[in-house]
C-alpha cells in the first residue's frame, strides 16, 4: 500500500510544514486527519482539500492534552475506518538565551515539543501494536543534531524527539509489531515558527538568517511523502533537509 488511501493524522496542520504536508498527501490520495488549535485554519484547509477532490477532516486539538490526541486518532478511525500514519509535527520555537530566564517558554516547549509527541504516541500505539503495522513520523530539527546559542531548550526538546523515535522503532522491532518511525531534521523553512520568538535580539537574528536562506515547507512535505511511500518492510529512519546554501 503506497500513499493512496492511507489514513494519515497530522498535528500542527494549521500552518507551515503540517499544512503543506496535508495538501501534498491528500493530492496523492491519502485521507488526512488534521489537528491543531486554530479551528478557522483547519476548516479552511479541509475545505480546500475537499474542493480539490481529496479527503480531509479536522478536529481542534491541543497536543498537550492527552485526551485531545486520543480523540484526534479516534476521529481518523471513526471517519475512515483505520489509521496508518501519524505525523507528530506540532511545535514551538521561542528561542532565547538561557540567561533571559524565559522559564514559561521553556515549559511550553517541553509541553508541546516533547509531551505533545508522547501524547501522540500514546494515542496510536495500542492500535498500531494490535494491527502490527503503523508509521510514526516526527518533525525534529537540525537543532536536535547540533547545539547553538539561543536554542538550548528548543534543541533539548528536539534531541528528545530523536531518542523517542529511535527507541520506539527498536522496541517495536523487538516486539514484532512492525511499527515504522521516521525523524525529520529540517533547517530553515519559511513558516510561522519565528512568530513564537519573544526575545528581540534572537528574533532579529533568526529573521535575518531565514530571509537569507529559508526554503518553502512543501520541501519537507515531499520528504514525508517519500518516507510513507517506501515498502512496508523498509524504514527510512532519518532525514536532514535544508536550504542548499545554508552553512
Ligand atoms: P508553524 O508555526 O507554521 O507551525 C506550527 C504548528 O504547530 C501550527 O500548526 C500550530 O497550530 C501547531 N501547534 C503549536 N502548538 C500546538 C499545540 N499545543 N497543540 C496543537 N498544535 C499546536 O511552524 P512549522 O511548520 O515550521 O513547525 C512545524 C514543526 O517543524 C515544529 O515542530 C517545528 O519545531 C519544526 N521545525 C521547523 C523548522 C523551520 O525552520 N520552520 C525547522 C526545524 C523544525 P495552532 O497554533 O493552530 O495550534
Image: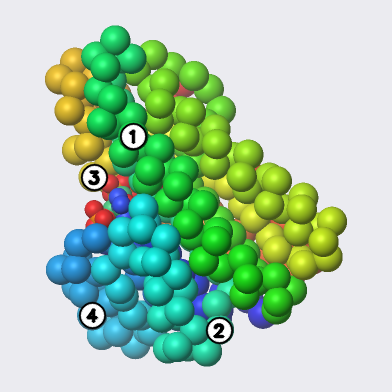
Whether residue 213 sits left or right of residue 48 in the image: it is right
Q: Which class describes the residues within 10 Å of circle 2: few (<14), some (14-19), or many (20+)?
A: some
From the image, tell me which residue sits under label 4.
Answer: 47
Residue 139's tag is none
Q: Between marks 1 and 4, how big is the CA–CA gap?
A: 34 Å
Of circles 1 and 3, the one toward us is 1
Q: Between marks 2 and 4, how big is the CA–CA gap?
A: 22 Å
From the image, tell me which residue sits under label 2.
Answer: 82
Residue 4, percent from left and from top: 55, 80
Q: Which class describes the residues within 10 Å of circle 1: few (<14), some (14-19), or many (20+)?
A: few
Q: Secondary structure at mark 1?
A: helix
From the image, tell me which residue sits under label 1.
Answer: 107
| Earlier sequence position, callout 2 versus callout 1 | 2
State yes or no: discs 2 and 4 in contact (Cβ < 8 Å): no
Of circles 1 and 4, the one toward us is 1
| Earlier sequence position, callout 1 versus callout 3 | 1
Q: Between marks 3 and 2, how big is the CA–CA gap?
A: 31 Å
Residue 192's tag is 3
Of circles 3 and 2, the one toward us is 2
Q: Between marks 1 and 3, how big is the CA–CA gap?
A: 20 Å
Amino acid at each position: 500500500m503506497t500513499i493512496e488511501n492511507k489514513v494519515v493524522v497530522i498535528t500542527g496542520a494549521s500552518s507551515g510544514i503540517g499544512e503543506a504536508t496535508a495538501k501534498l498527501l491528500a493530492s496523492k490520495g491519502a485521507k488526512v486527519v488534521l489537528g491543531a488549535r486554530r479551528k478557522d485554519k483547519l476548516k479552511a484547509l479541509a475545505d480546500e482539500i475537499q474542493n480539490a477532490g481529496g479527503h480531509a477532516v479536522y478536529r481542534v486539538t491541543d497536543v498537550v492534552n492527552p485526551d485531545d490526541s486520543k480523540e484526534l486518532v479516534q476521529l481518523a478511525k471513526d471517519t475512515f475506518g483505520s489509521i496508518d500514519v501519524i505525523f507528530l509535527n506540532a511545535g514551538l520555537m521561542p528561542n532565547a538565551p538561557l540567561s533571559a530566564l524565559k522559564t514559561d517558554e521553556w515549559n511550553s516547549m517541553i509541553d508541546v515539543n516533547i509531551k505533545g509527541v508522547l501524547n501522540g504516541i500514546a494515542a496510536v500505539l495500542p492500535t498500531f501494536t494490535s494491527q502490527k503495522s503503523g508509521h510514526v513520523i516526527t518533525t525534529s530539527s537540525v537543532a536536535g543534531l547540533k547545539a547553538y546559542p539561543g536554542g538550548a531548550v528548543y534543541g533539548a526538546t528536539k534531541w528528545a524527539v530523536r531518542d523517542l523515535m529511535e527507541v520506539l522503532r527498536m522496541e517495536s522491532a523487538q516486539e514484532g509489531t512492525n511499527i515504522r518511525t521516521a525523524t525529520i531534521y529540517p533547517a530553515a523553512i519559511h513558516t510561522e515558527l519565528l512568530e513564537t520568538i519573544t526575545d528581540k535580539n534572537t528574533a532579529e537574528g533568526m529573521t535575518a538568517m531565514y530571509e537569507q536562506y529559508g526554503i518553502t515547507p512543501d520541501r519537507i512535505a515531499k520528504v514525508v511523502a517519500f518516507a510513507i511511500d517506501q515498502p512496508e518492510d523498509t524504514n527510512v529512519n532519518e532525514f536532514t533537509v535544508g536550504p542548499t546554501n545554508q552553512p
